[in-house]
Amino acid sequence: MGRLSELFDPASVGVLGATDREGAVGRAIVENLRADFDGDIVPINPSREEVLGLECYADVTTAPQIDLAVVVVPPPAVLETVRELAVAGIENVIVITAGFAETGDEGAERERELAEIAAEYDLNVVGPNSLGVISTDAGMNATFAPENARQGSISFLSQSGAFITAVLEWANEQGIGFRNVVSLGNKTVLDETDFVREWGHDPETDVGIGYLESIDDGRTFMDAAGEVTAETPIVLVKSGRTDAGAQAASSHTGAIAGSERAYEAALEQAGVIRATSVQELFDYARALSGLTEPESDGVAVVTNAGGPGVLTTDAVGDSRLEMATFTDETIGKLTEVLPDESNVYNPIDAVGDADADRLGDALEIAVSDPNVGSAAVVAAPTAVLQYDVLSETIIEKRETSGKPIVTSLMGGQSARAAEEVLREFGIPNYFDPSRAVAGLDALARYRDVRSRTVDDPERFDVDRERAREILSRAARRGDNRLGVESMELLEAYGIPTPAGEIVDDPDRARAMAESISGDVVVKVVSPDISHKSDIGGVKVGVTDEQVCDAYEDVVSRARTYQPDATILGVQIQEKLDLEGSTETIVGMSRDPQFGPLVLFGLGGIFVEILEDTSVRVAPVDEGAARQMIEEIRATPLFRGARGRESADIEAISETIQRLSQLATDFPAILELDVNPLVAGADGVRAIDLRLTVDTEEL
Amino acid sequence: MGRLSELFDPASVGVLGATDREGAVGRAIVENLRADFDGDIVPINPSREEVLGLECYADVTTAPQIDLAVVVVPPPAVLETVRELAVAGIENVIVITAGFAETGDEGAERERELAEIAAEYDLNVVGPNSLGVISTDAGMNATFAPENARQGSISFLSQSGAFITAVLEWANEQGIGFRNVVSLGNKTVLDETDFVREWGHDPETDVGIGYLESIDDGRTFMDAAGEVTAETPIVLVKSGRTDAGAQAASSHTGAIAGSERAYEAALEQAGVIRATSVQELFDYARALSGLTEPESDGVAVVTNAGGPGVLTTDAVGDSRLEMATFTDETIGKLTEVLPDESNVYNPIDAVGDADADRLGDALEIAVSDPNVGSAAVVAAPTAVLQYDVLSETIIEKRETSGKPIVTSLMGGQSARAAEEVLREFGIPNYFDPSRAVAGLDALARYRDVRSRTVDDPERFDVDRERAREILSRAARRGDNRLGVESMELLEAYGIPTPAGEIVDDPDRARAMAESISGDVVVKVVSPDISHKSDIGGVKVGVTDEQVCDAYEDVVSRARTYQPDATILGVQIQEKLDLEGSTETIVGMSRDPQFGPLVLFGLGGIFVEILEDTSVRVAPVDEGAARQMIEEIRATPLFRGARGRESADIEAISETIQRLSQLATDFPAILELDVNPLVAGADGVRAIDLRLTVDTEEL
C-alpha cells in the first residue's frame, strides 16, 4: 500500500452509483463534490446519462481516468464494482455503502471478500459504511454530510460517521478548520493506524484528532502513533471507557473492546493525549493547532475580573501547571504600571476599570518574566475595555515573547469579533477560564511527550531454557494454572525468591526447616486454592519443632476447604524479616489488542481493596518501571516515609523489567502475579506466585 | 432585619450620586433603571437639577418617598449619606461605592462604621463595593453592569461583581433567565446566608446559584442552606479550592479562607451541590431550574448517532447514574418500531436515517419502562431529522411521562430554534452529550439531598466533669499539647482504651506488666516527641521479664533523640491481638468558619501516605458516622474483605460520634487525633492520643 496522499488530493473523483434522485446518498455526494472541488467529477451509473448536469458513464472502463472512486452502489453490487475499479488500475476507493459486518453474517462474509480483493490488488479502501472523506485543501467533500468543513490544520478521523456530522456544523460556527476529515467506517482495509501515519507525513497537519471505539492492531498502532507524536500532537477520544460504554461500543462496532487500562496505558505510552468528551477534544485541539508548547510550567494570569481570576487560579492548581512566582523585577514593574488597588502578584488583577492598554502592559511584563512559561488573559466585559484592542495587544505580546497565550474573554456577542481575530493568529478563546487552562495544560502535556526519551528495554541475562522447561513440564502435566511450585520460573529470570523448597512429607519438612536459619513459613501448595491464607493454609513463624504439626495442619485445612483439591506438597520457606518492608505486587496479563500488560502496585490485601496500581504495555524500560513505582499513591512508602528505611527502588524496578521480559519471551503466559513481592531496604523477594498458561502455545 | 422582599420589589428607587456625566457609574445605574423599571426613579445629587431628564433632588429629606436607595457617592461621603437615609426611615440600601476594607486600613475603618450605622438603624445593606442588584420581575436593574438579565427562575448571588458581568451577556445569548442577581460586594451587613434564606422564602426561585470566595459564619450558613435545600436546590462555586486559588481568593477579598476540606464537608452536609467552573454551574442550574428529579437512577439514551451514543453511555458510567436495563416488554416494543439495524438495548440507536417520529416512538417506549428514571436524547443533524419536530415530540413525552429528559441535539444553527423551544418547556439542550448527563446527574444528586433525613445526633452519657478536670489539670501545668498520659479523657467519653498505666520507675513497670495478662507494649510518654515509634520509643510484645530493660531503653532513646524533652513517664499497656484488625484514625480539628471538623480514616502510617480519610462538620449523627466509614477507599477492610472478620462497624461509628460530642463540648480542644484506633471484630481500642488545647479557653 502506498502513501495516502492521492486519497486527499486526487485530480479526478469518480462516483459509482451517482444519481440525481432527491434524498439519495449518491446525489448528496455529487452535490458536495460540486460545491468546491477543482478537479474532475465523474458520475458513473449505467442507468443515467447525466447526473446534476454532469455527463454520466455506464462503467469505469468507458469513463475518463479517475484517481479516486467513491462507491455508493447497493450492497450486493459493491464487490463487483470494486473489482472492476481494481482491474481498471484505480487504487483509491471509498466505500460509502453500508450493509457489511455491522449487519450480520452475510454482511461479514461480503466484508471478508472485500478485504481479499483489496489485498489482491493492493487497494487503499476507506470504509465500507463510511460517511466519506473531506480534504479541504483540495476543496474535496467526498461525503454525504450536510455540512462541509472549513479549511484549517486539524486532521480528523472518526470511527463514527455520526460523530463527524454532529460536530461539523458546530465547528464551522466556532471557526474550527480542518485539514481533512476521514470517516473510517468498518476499517476493513485502512484503519486508524494508516491515517495516523499519514499525519506524520503531512507537514500541514498541526494536530491529529480522532474518535475511536476500538483499535485493531494495538501494538502497530502504538508504534505508529509513538513516531508521529514525536513531531505532531495527537488527541483522541477512545470511547467505551466505562463498562457500560464498552458494551455499547462493542454492540455498535462489533469489535472486541480491549481493557480500558490497556488502552489508557498504550495511548499514554504512545504519547497520545486522551480526551473524554467532544468539548475536551476540541479544547485541546484548538490550543495544540495554534500554539507552541511552553518551556516551563509557570502560568501568569492577567485579568480585569477578580472572581474569574481566582477561578482560573484554581484551574491551574488542578492541572499539571502551576501559578508562576514572579521575580522582584516583575513585581516592581507591575507596581509601576498598575493602580494601587491592583494585585501585582499572580493572578494579576488590574481591577475593573482596566482598559486594553493596562492589561496589555501587565501581560507584557508578565510574559517577560523568566518564571513564566505561558499566560492566560481572563476578562469580563466592561464599558472601558475594548476586546478588539485587547486582542491586537495579545497577538503582539505573544509574537514578541514567543510564549503561548490563551484567552478567556468572557461575554457573548461582544467577544465574538475579538475571538475571530485571535483565532487567525492561533490563539484560542474559551468562554470558561477553566477550559482555557485545559488548553494550556494540553500544550504542557505535549511538551512532555516531545521531550521524553524512550530507551530500548534492557535485555537481562536470563535462563530462558530453564523457564521454557518449567512451563513445558506444566504443559505436559496438563496444568494451566501454576503456583509456588513454579517459583523456579522467577529464579530463571533473576527475580529473587526466599530460600526453601516444596516437600511432600513431614520429615522432609523438618529437615528443610532445620537447613534454614530461623523460623520458617509453612504453606500448602495447591493450584486449586487461590487465597491460601484465607483458609488457614499458611503458617508464619514456625519453629523447627513445630514444623511437622504445621505441615499436617495446613494440609488438613486445605482438604477440609476443598476435598478434591490437588495438593502438590507443602512449601517450607525462609521467614523474611518484614519489619520495615512493604508488600507489593508485580504482575502481567495479556490484552487482546496490546499484548502483555505489566502491573505494579501495593500488594497483599491492599491490591484488591485500594487498587493502587500502575500499568504499562510491555516491554517496559527502566524509565517506565521507575514511573510505575512513582505513580502509585503509596509510593512514599518506598521513599522512607515516616522514619522507615527507603526500599531498594532499583531492585523493584529491575523486577518489573525482568517480568516484562518474561512476559514478552513467553506468549504462552496469559496471566502472572507475584503477590506479595516483599520490597525492603536490601532488595526484594517474591513470596508467592500464580500464573495461567495457554498449554496449547507451549 | 426584616425579609428582603422590598430590596427586590421596591415601588421607588433613589440613586444617591446620580449624574449624567458620561462614563460615570452614577449615570449607568440611572440608565439601567430607566430601561425597564416600572416604579419611580429618584435621582439625588445636590449639584444637579436633572439627571437624564428626571428631576434630581438635593438630598433624601427633600426627595419623594423611596423604598430602596442605591448609593454611588464618593467614598468619604458614604457614611453620612447612609446615616441620612437611615434617619429618613429608608431600610434598604445598596452601596455601590468601593474604597472600603479591600483598600487598606482607612477603608476598613470606614467599613466598621458602616456596619455600626446599619446595626443602629437595622438596615438591609448590600455592599459596599457591589455591582448592584437586579430583580427581573420588577424590571429593576440597579447595577452598573453593561447587560441586563433575562427573566427566569434562577436566583444568582456573587461575591465577585466581575463574575456577574462575565456571565450576563453569555447567559442572555444562551437564553438563561434569572429571578434576581445580587452582587454581595464586601458583605458588611447582608451576606450569602441572608440571600440563601430569601431563596427559601421565594416560591418563584426554582434554583439558587452563587459564586463565593468565603463563607463568613459557616455554622449559620450551613443551617440556613440546609433548610433551603430541603425545598430548593442550591448550586455554588466556592473558589479557592486549591492552595494557589485560596491564596488568590484571600488576597482578593481579604477574607480568611477556611480549609477546603471543611468547605467541602459543610456544603455537602448542607445539601449544596458544588460546581467547580462557570460552565458546570450553569449546566447544573439549567437542569435543576426546569426539570423534576428522577425517581430512579436508570437512564435511557435515545440517539440517531452511534458514536455520540457510546460517549453518552461513558458519561453515564462516570456519573452516579446508570444505564437502565430495559424490560422484555420494552425490548419487544422497540424491536417492533425500529428497523433491523437498530440497537434496541440501551443506548437505543435508531440509526442514521431516523426521523423525528422514529426517535419519538423510541423515546416514548423508553420512558414508559419502569426501570427508566430519566432520559437523554442525543442527535446528530441529518437530512431526514427535523430538530423542530423532534423537540415538540420530546416536550410531549416529557409531559406525559413526568420523567426528566435532557437533550444533546448537536450541531450549530440547525439546533438553535429547537433549543429555544425546548428551553421554554424547561428542557436544557447541551452541545456536548457528557454535559447533558451532568445535568441529569445534578438532578439525581438533588433528589438524594431532598430525600435524606438528618437525625439529631445522639447525646451519649459521658463523664463531662472528669474530662473537664483532665483538661484543666493540663492547663494548670501550662501544657497545650497532650498525649497518651491523657487517655483518661477518652475513657471519660466512653471510648475504649487498652488496659495499662503510665509509670515512672522500672519496678512499677514490672508490677504493672505482671498485672496484665500476656505481653505488653512499652512506650515512652513525652509531649515533645510526636512519632515515638520512629525513634525507637515503643517496644511491642515485651514479656514481664523484659519490661525493666525495655523501660530503660525507651527512656534513653527519647533522651538521645531530644535531650531537653519532657518525659512524663513510660506507658505499660496491654498488647492487643492485632491479627485481623485494622488501624484507623479518628480525629478532629477546629475550622475557623465551621468549628469542629471530625475525621475518620485508615490509620497508622497509611493516614499520611494514602490520605484515605473522610470528614464531617460536627455534630456527627449515626448516619453520617456510618457514611464516613463507607466513604474511605479502604472501607472493604471493615466489611470482612479477603476472609478477614468484619470489624465492629457499630463500635467505630459510636467512637466517631463520641469524639464529635467531645469536640462540641470542649471548644478548648483545637486538635485531637486518636491514631491508631484499632478496629477489630470485637470492638475498638484507642492506642495513642495526641491533642492540642487552647489553655486560655479552659
Image (spheres, coloured by chain):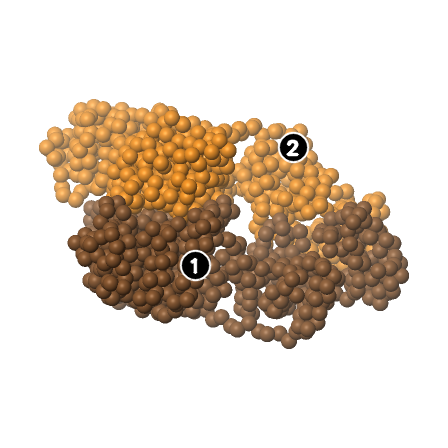
Chain colours: A orange, B brown
Q: Can you tell which mark lies on residue B129?
A: none
Q: Residue furthest bottom?
A: B461
Q: Residue at x 82, y 52 (%)?
A: B555
Q: Position of residue B391 (x, y in %)?
A: 23, 56
Above or below, B374 against A331 in this view is below
Q: Can you tell which mark lies on residue B113?
A: 1
Would you say B35 lies left or right of B531 here? Answer: left
Q: Residue at x 55, y 65 (%)?
A: B618
Element type where label 1 sits in the image: helix
Above or below, B107 against B487 in this view is above
Q: Quadrant of residue B199?
A: bottom left
Would you say B439 lies left or right of A613 here? Answer: left
The subunit letter for the residue under badge 1 reads B
Which of the image's four quarters has the C terminus of chain B?
bottom right
Q: Can you tell which mark lies on residue A464?
A: 2
Element type where label 2 sits in the image: helix
Q: Residue at x 40, y 27 (%)?
A: A402
Count residues near mark 2 (Cα–Cα under 10 Å), then give few for <14, some for 14-19, many for 20+. Answer: some
Q: Position of residue A586 (x, y in %)?
A: 62, 43
- Labels 1 & 2 near each other (Cβ < 8 A): no
Q: Amino acid at mark 1?
A: Glu
**Can residue B437 be seen in the rendering of this structure?**
no
Above or below, B695 against B309 in this view is below
Q: Position of residue A94 (x, y in %)?
A: 28, 34
Would you say B12 lies left or right of B95 here? Answer: left
Work out whether residue A698 or residue A444 is closer to the camera in this orientation and state it.
A444
Q: Residue at x 42, y 69 (%)?
A: B227
Q: Amino acid at mark 2?
A: Arg
Q: Position of residue B130 (x, y in %)?
A: 35, 54
